[in-house]
Structure formats: structure tokens, C-alpha cells
Amino acid sequence: GGGLTPNNNDGGAGGSGVAIIRFNSSNLSDVSIINQHPKIIHNYSIGTSININGQQSYYYQFTSNNGNYIMFPQDTLCDIFMIGGGGGGGRGYGGGGGAGSYCYTTQLFLKNTVYELGVGAGGTGQNADSVVGKAGGDTYIKILDDTNYVKIVKGGGYGGGFAALNGGTGGCGGGGYGWNNNTGSNITTPGGNIINNSLTNNGIGFCGGKGINNYNGNALAGGGGGGCASPGTDYSGINAGNGGDGILIDIKGFKEVYGGGGGGGAWGEKNGAPGYGGGNYINNLYINVGGGGGKTFSTIFLPGCGSDALINTGSGGGGGGQYPSNGGNGSSGTIIIRYNNGISYNSDMPTILHNNVIDIPKTISNNISNDYYYQFNSTTGNNNITFNKETNCDILVVGGGGS
């Protein structure tokens, strides 16, 4: 209450009252808590999450092939994007490498559980007739020391070449080859298929395109490697196939392109056009992430070699152009995990309106018993609390002091 002040005879104003409500959340399902940042190891070194545009959302991107771990201090529902490594392109009129398959979904990470994250390496392009270009590596998430995968996506297939004419099978298939050392042939070579119905089981991906070996028709051209958004295209006339389109992803708060197929290589001496690497549009500009196919061979500068895919996009390498131009390398995949660092608010927790503003309960210090409280002290506006189920509470109500 109010009272006399030392220097005048007027009484003081009384203090406002207060209402405090305390409840235990043990009878509420899925207790709401404030998230804390996870512990992150990337390539055997400590990593730090990156904030997204000043919001309560954070992400971390894993690009190292191994030595990656993450552990959350409480159950946390995250957005995840992951893509396998892209396949290498074929040599000499080679097919483009396929992109790795991808997965963009949500995943619940259990508290105090160490997860191992493996990022698929990009496959090397074919660099000799006797070897096959390499497929991309698989990307996965699993609980440490567990043999089962939480999530896995497959690496892209290699582009067809002299050692293996057909495009390789993978998360996305590699493009077919355009030459079998037979000048009398007029045949097509198929692109690679996707692994194990990857549209449902091992991530999303598409097949590679066909190559053509028609020496007398001046058509020696590789097919395009499959992309994450569309198949690689077949040869067209004397021109090589293009890599399949990549996908647009904005999990980091801005748009990026991942998973483009590699373009097929062409017979540049006969004016065949190589295929371009797959990509997608950002602000009306097509961004190529898959490697482009090669064209004309030169013993000095080797401009006929297929181009390498853009790093850490899980894209396929370009097919080599005029023989013996080498195929381009596919690029490593990636894993991106995004989480919210604010209140993980549950519909079973009470709804609070304080002075016309929605608010949230406060946790008790050293909250071992899952106790929460809220203090109402506004004398204006609407103040109310609504529980979704019957809840026993401790309450303290104090009226305003008199003047």
C-alpha cells in the first residue's frame, strides 16, 4: 500500500497486484522446451551453425566425405537436404555422368544421440580406354555404430565410355556412349537406369539419355546424364544430349541449384555440338552445375575434355569430346541440416494472452521436474490462459495495494 513520504504529506500510490500460475508438464504430451544448438564435428573439426537472415533458424552444411557427426541436446525436428555424389563422364564421345539422387524432407534427431553423416564423393571421369568412369558415392545419415541407415541417397552413374558403352546405373543414370570403334555401325547406346526404384527408396533421380554411334552419318555423340529434376536428353542428329535439370533448394534462406546431369561429348571435327551441363533458373538465369560435354580434341590444350561438375552439388561430370578426350569429374554431394532455435511450442501447452500479446510459459530454474510458470502483471488489455486439458496448478494472486 501507499504511505507518507519523508518530505511531503501526500500518500504514495499503491503497487499493482500480480497473478502467478505454476504447473507441471508431466501430464502434457511432448513437453515444449527451448532448443539449444547441437554439437557438430565436420571433417574431425568442431563446426558452428550459421544463422538464417537474423531469424531463429540455423543450418549447417556438411561437405566432407567423412569425419562428420552431430548431436542435439534434446529431440529436434529438422529440415534436411542430402544428395549423393555425381558420376564421372565417359571418354571420347562419352556420356555425361549422372547426378546423385536427393532427399529433401524432415527428420527427428533424438536427444543425446550421436549421428554419423557420410557425404558421397564425386566420381572421377574416364581417363583411359581400359577403365570405366567412376560412379558417385552414396550420402547417408545413421546413428553411430548402428549398421542401419536413417537416410541414404545414391551416387550418380558413370557416363558411358569405351570400356562400358551403356551409361551406368545410379541415383541418376549416366548417359550412353557414342563410339564403339566400328565405322560401319549405326546404333544407339542406352543411358543408365536409376537404382532400386530410387523415386521411393533411395532418393529421387532420373535416367540418362541415349548416345549415338553413326560414323558414316557424322554422328558420334554421348547422351546426357540424368539430373535430379529431369532425365538426361538423348542425342539429337549429330549433337550430344544435355544433362538433366537440377533442383532449386532454399533450405539455407536463399536459392541454390543441386543435382545437374553432365552433358554428353560430341564429334567437334564434324561440327557436332556438345551437351550442356544440367542446372536450373535463378532470377531468369540458367545456372549450370553439371559439367558440360567436350567437343574438339587438341594434343596441346585438350579442350575436348568434359568439364568437371560444380563442387558440392552432387552433379555429373561432362562427357569427353572427340576421341581421346577424357571425361569430367562428378562433384561430391552434401548434407544440409536446418533447425529452429526458438521455442518448440506444442499445442498441448497452454495458450497465454498477456496485455493482448501471445506469450509462452517460463521454465523453472534447474527444471528437473518439468515445472513451468507464467506471471501476469499487466493491469490493461486482455489477460487469460487456456489449457487444452485438465491441469492442476499452483497459483498466487495478490491484489493491488491501496494508496
Image: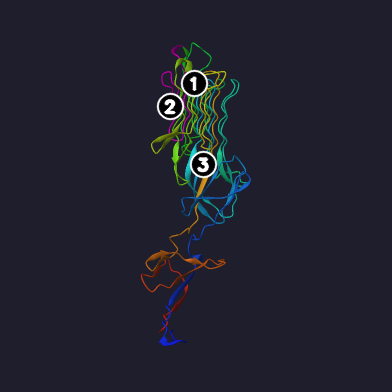
Distance in Å between CA atoms under marks 1 and 3: 32 Å
Q: Secondary structure at mark 2?
A: loop
Above-or-below relation of 204 to 383: above
Q: What's under tag 3, amino acid-wise?
A: Met
Where 371 falls versus 83 (above or below)?
below
**Residue 63 tag number:** none
* Of residues 147 and 137, the one drawn nearer to the viewer in this rendering: 137
**Secondary structure beneath label 3:** strand
Q: Residue at x 38, y 36 (%)?
A: 284
Q: CA distance from mark 2 to mark 1?
A: 17 Å
Q: Quadrant of the C terminus?
A: bottom left
Query: Looking at the picture, how far across and down is residue 120, in whole percent?
Result: 56, 37
Q: Amino acid at mark 2?
A: Thr
Q: Height in image: 265 above or below 244?
A: above
Give the x, y percent position of residue 103: 48, 41
Name, please, the residue furthest toward the left: 381
Q: Earlier in the sequence, mark 2 or mark 3?
A: 3
Mark number for residue 82? 3
Left or right of 379? Residue 28 is right
What residue did someone put label 2 on?
233
Judging by the rendered image, the residue that carries numbered circle 1 is 295
Q: Earlier in the sequence, mark 2 or mark 1?
A: 2
Q: For the magenta stretch, what is the residue range?
A: 216-240
